[in-house]
């Protein structure tokens, strides 16, 4: 999962080996000690996981399954109206359960035959270079916790709903599995950390929060929009700007609020050509040149 989100809920391990997820005071689960312990336990299981092992069995509760059912029920009609066609088709291709939270291994078993991607567990923070770099090998780092049940249709951070309903279905498409993979390839070409952050921001404003003209209307393709019950209803009313890689790569944003500025592609071909072309060819030198030209513009 993306690093910026975990700046909101960092995970630490103390000298005694106790794992703690630090929820912000405005987090829906901040005052719920049971939820906080659950988050700590799930993070610990992810930290104990080793490559090659099956994903930890976190033993989802009926309450957690209920959150998943609610989100799936409420989002499906919105996806049918507001998501790009390729994503809507992936809902059936991936064929994930809607009555219970799938394990990461179940997601991988459905996804890998389609595009080769597989899921591995993350406790929270995954450094940018590790997260994006692993996409080259078609590996997606994912949290396993479920948002607080008091607000099943809202989360201030990426939970398994975002990771699977948002990214999982994109990873089941030809277009976005390739965009994820190309992001991984680009990460291995970039040596400069500032340029890697530039790359991550382009990813944010496209793969996470991208919108596009398709079949005569504006539709969403970003995982952050497609996994958000509220934001998927609002994205058409936000400020829309044309694709501008230099502007995206130097912009600031707040992950805990709806994105007020979105970048609107004229077609899926433009997404593939402009965004995919950037991920396929960017280098430290080309990004630095883009940054210089943007400052001078």
Image (spheres, grey):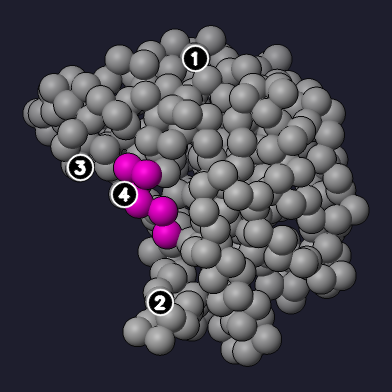
Frontmost of labels 3 and 2 is: 2
Q: Residue 135 lies in magenta, yes or no?
A: no
**Which element is circle 2 on?**
strand
Instruction: For marks 4 and 2, give the CA distance.
Output: 30 Å
Label 1: which residue? 272
Label 3: which residue? 193
Q: Upstream in the sequence, badge 4 or badge 2?
A: 2
Residue contact between numbered discs 4 and 3, judged by CB atoms under 8 Å:
no
Q: Residues within 10 Å of mark 1 (few under 14, many from 20)?
A: some
Residue at horizontal 87%, vertical 70%?
62
Start-end of magenta stretch = 125-130
Instruction: For marks 1 and 3, give the CA distance.
Output: 25 Å
Instruction: For marks 2 and 1, give the CA distance.
Output: 41 Å
> In the image, residue 54 lies at what x, y percent?
65, 50
| Most foreground residue, 263 or 195 | 195
Residue 69 location, quadrant: bottom right
């Amino acid at each position: 999962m993306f690093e910026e989100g975990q700046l909101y809920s960092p995970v630490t391990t103390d000298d005694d080996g106790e794992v703690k997820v630090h929820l912000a005071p405005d987090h829906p689960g901040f005052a719920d000690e049971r939820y906080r312990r659950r988050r700590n336990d799930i993070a610990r299981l992810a930290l104990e996981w080793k490559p090659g092992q099956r994903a930890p069995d976190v033993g989802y509760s009926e309450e957690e399954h209920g959150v998943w059912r609610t989100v799936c029920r409420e989002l499906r009609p919105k996806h049918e109206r507001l998501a790009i066609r390729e994503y809507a088709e992936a809902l059936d291709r991936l064929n994930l359960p809607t009555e219970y939270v799938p394990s990461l291994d179940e997601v991988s078993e459905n996804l890998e035959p389609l595009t080769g991607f597989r899921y591995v567990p993350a406790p929270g923070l995954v450094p940018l270079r590790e997260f994006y770099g692993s996409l080259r090998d078609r590996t997606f780092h994912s949290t396993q916790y479920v948002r607080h049940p008091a607000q099943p249709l809202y989360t201030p951070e990426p939970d398994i709903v975002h990771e699977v309903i948002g990214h999982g279905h994109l990873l089941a498409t030809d277009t976005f599995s390739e965009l994820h993979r190309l992001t991984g390839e680009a990460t291995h070409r970039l040596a400069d950390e500032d340029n890697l952050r530039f790359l991550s921001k382009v990813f944010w404003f496209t793969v996470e929060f991208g919108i596009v003209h398709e079949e005569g209307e504006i539709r969403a393709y970003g995982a952050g929009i497609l996994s958000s019950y509220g934001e998927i209803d609002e994205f058409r009313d936000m400020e829309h700007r044309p694709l501008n890689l230099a502007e995206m790569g130097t912009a600031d944003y707040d992950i805990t609020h709806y994105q007020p500025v979105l970048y609107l592609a004229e077609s899926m071909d433009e997404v593939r050509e402009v965004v995919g072309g950037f991920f396929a060819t960017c280098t430290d030198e080309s990004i630095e040149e883009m940054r210089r030209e943007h400052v001078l513009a």
